[in-house]
Image: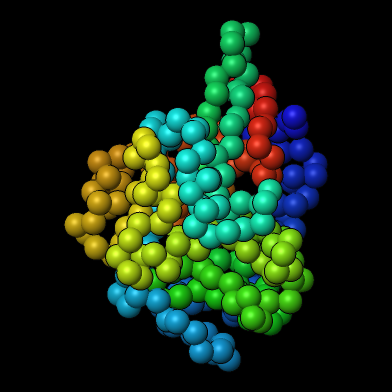
Amino acid sequence: MSQTSPSLAPAQAGKRGFLQELIGLATAFGMAGAGHAATPFAPGQPQRRPGMEGKRFGMLVDLRKCIGCQACTVSCSVENQPPIGQFRTTVLQYEVDRPDGSAPAMVSLPRLCNHCEEPPCVPVCPVQATFQRSDGIVLVDNERCVGCGYCVQACPYDARFINHETQTADKCTFCEHRLEVGLLPACVESCVGGARVIGDLNDAGSEINRRMAEHRDEIKVLKPGMKTEPRVFYVGLPDEFVNGVDGQASVRLVSDH
């Protein structure tokens, strides 16, 4: 069982610096402009499904309702069929030491692709296999992907992996194939505690916007300092986890809190 803490270890700090440099380079070359998500295809991009016009999808995760049951992890695997041992979404269990020496607290933290407004995985792809639809969903064109792993390294959220079977990049897609026919993503539909909500952030009356308005002062995102503008939001996220979470291990120990 590995160990981490919000005070970054040298290796973690080095990785963060590398990611920041990647994002900075992409911005400097005009590859990650503010209007990137507004058009179906960036210049020179191959024709693809443009997304659901006028919508901007996001997800809200209420950690107070998550019981760590892994129903979302299982249903996602059944729906999307990643290789055994690889997952598009996980619920990591964090053991948090208490300063008074009492029994550690357990925190269940769902992790997935954040479908960022400024996704750093898009500009680093040398073959334009990773792209962002007009509705904000970030996808991988597996017919173009060469499995170089640049996008995996560029993602600050450790949300991507190279699929062992296809040898191409893989990750959460918000189950866009289900959204397009009016269904919920598998992880949202299967969540027994109702911890996950997905919806259109452009619709003021959507459930996700209503819930976010109710908890306006409690909404947090992971690694805001990376300037990716993630569209996965959390309620009940301890401050220690905002910038102190790395890796995809199933269990991590967060000490000194």
Number of marks present in the image shown: 0
Q: Position of residue 68 (x, y in %)?
A: 50, 33
Residue closer to the observer: 148 or 31: 148
Name the quadrant of the C terminus. Answer: top right
Kindly tell me whether residue 118 is visible in this rendering: no
Residue closer to the observer: 157 or 111: 111
Kindly tell me whether residue 48 is visible in this rendering: yes
Q: Position of residue 24 (x, y in %)?
A: 65, 67
Q: Residue furthest left?
A: 205
Q: Is residue 170 above or below residue 105?
A: below
Q: Is residue 215 above or below residue 64?
A: below
Q: Residue at x 74, y 68 (%)?
A: 167
Q: Residue at x 35, y 75 (%)?
A: 52
Using the rendered view, name the quadrant where residue 139 is placed.
bottom right
Image check: 165 left or right of 55? right
Q: Is residue 90 above or below residue 5?
A: below
Residue closer to the observer: 208 or 10: 208
Q: Residue at x 41, y 56 (%)?
A: 185
Q: Position of residue 225 (x, y in %)?
A: 57, 51
Q: Is residue 235 above or below residue 105?
A: below
Name the quadrant of the N terminus. Answer: top right
Image check: 46 left or right of 5? left
Using the rendered view, name the quadrant where residue 228 is placed.
bottom right
Q: Position of residue 70 (x, y in %)?
A: 51, 38
> What kind of colouring is applied to the model shown?
rainbow
Image check: 126 left or right of 92? right
